[in-house]
């Protein structure tokens, strides 16, 4: 028993080197990235000379000179006022009425605005761990609200995804850890399937190429047997229908063979060119 196990271990020791398969670990994508969060667009195109939201309703700012408007613009006041305009623009897409504050659509739009603003900041400062944790919490909270809306009002859920340009990515039911051994095993199975399919395709082409001469021999043999039986006044076992069926198969094979030959010629001419 031990000797048999040792022989099998020695024989399979170098098998993994015979299969030329290279496994590359997939690139790690952080959770705050749009590919993971499901945000299909970035920040809305808000001009830098836009007046901040707290000063936009003022009557004096409308008639003020450009230098004063520049002071009260989001480019001068900073990121906080810019993020307020982003939140307002996204909320206006989905809010039910003017005083809508606590609906699920409003909450999802506000969270989406915060997420996209923080994603923009994280692109410049990817090592900010506190902000990374904050955006992950917001993404989880938005998933929870989207799941609730998907369960109770699916039409509104689809409409909200279209308006905010979001892709819903629910949490997986089970977690599967990626390993090199399992990936190499699957790649080896795929490699073996490709070899098997290529050999089967080659064998099928070989049989199809031999089908024409075989049908010709079969047709000649059937005609000879029928003529000999009629001359010797024996019971005829080969009918005209059988001969016509073989002739039809031979005609179909010749048509397919012509098409294959023309395709091979075109491929050869393309390679030569």
Image (cartoon, rainbow, N blue to C red):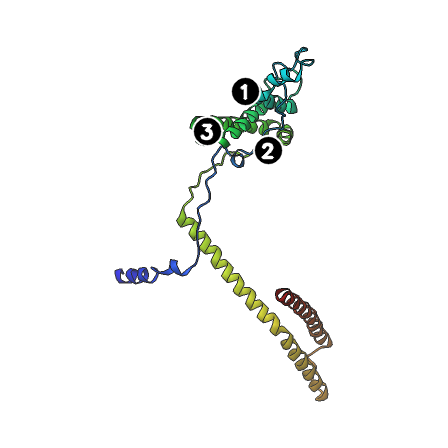
Q: Position of residue 150 (x, y in %)?
A: 59, 29
Residue that protrudes farthest toward the bottom in the picture: 232
Badge 3: few (under 14), some or many (20 or more) residues near its Cα, within 10 Å?
some
Return the residue at label 2.
41
CA gap, disc 1 and disc 2: 20 Å
CA gap, disc 2 and disc 3: 19 Å
Give 264 or 84, whichever is nearer the viewer.
Answer: 84
Say which element carries label 3: helix
Work out whether mark 1 precedes mark 2 in sequence or the reverse, and give the earlier one.
Answer: 2
Look at discs 1 and 2 and give the one toward the viewer: 1
Give 54 or 200, whichever is nearer the viewer.
Answer: 54
Give 55 or 114, whichever is nearer the viewer.
Answer: 55
Residue plotted at (43% across, 58% down): 20
Badge 2: few (under 14), some or many (20 or more) residues near its Cα, within 10 Å?
few
Return the residue at label 3.
132
Q: Position of residue 263 (x, y in %)?
A: 66, 66
Q: Is residue 30 above or below residue 112?
A: below
Residue 12 relative to residue 166: left or right: left
Q: Position of residue 139 (x, y in %)?
A: 51, 28
CA gap, disc 1 and disc 3: 18 Å
Q: Quadrant of the N terminus?
A: bottom left
């Amino acid at each position: 028993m031990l000797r048999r196990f040792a022989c099998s271990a020695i024989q399979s020791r170098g098998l993994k080197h015979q299969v030329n398969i290279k496994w590359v670990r997939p690139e790690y994508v952080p959770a705050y990235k749009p590919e993971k969060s499901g945000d299909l667009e970035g920040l809305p195109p808000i001009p830098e000379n836009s007046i901040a939201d707290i000063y936009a309703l003022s009557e004096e700012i409308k008639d003020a000179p450009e230098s004063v408007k520049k002071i009260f613009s989001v480019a001068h006041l900073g990121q906080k006022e810019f993020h307020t305009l982003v939140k307002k623009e996204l909320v206006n897409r989905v809010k039910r009425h003017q005083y809508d504050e606590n609906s699920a659509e409003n909450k999802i739009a506000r969270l989406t605005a915060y997420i996209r603003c923080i994603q923009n900041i994280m692109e410049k400062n990817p090592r900010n761990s506190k902000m990374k944790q904050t955006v992950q919490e917001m993404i989880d909270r938005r998933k929870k609200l989207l799941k609730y809306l998907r369960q109770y009002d699916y039409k509104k859920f689809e409409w909200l995804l279209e308006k905010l340009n979001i892709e819903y990515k629910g949490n997986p039911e089970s977690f599967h850890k990626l390993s090199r051994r399992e990936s190499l095993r699957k790649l080896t199975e795929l490699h073996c399937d490709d070899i098997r399919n290529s050999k089967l395709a080659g064998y099928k082409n070989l049989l199809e190429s031999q089908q024409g001469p075989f049908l010709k021999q079969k047709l000649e043999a059937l005609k000879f047997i029928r003529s000999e039986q009629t001359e010797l006044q024996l019971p005829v076992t080969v009918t005209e229908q059988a001969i016509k069926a073989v002739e039809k198969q031979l005609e179909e094979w010749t048509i397919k063979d012509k098409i294959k030959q023309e395709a091979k010629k075109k491929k050869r001419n393309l390679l030569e060119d």
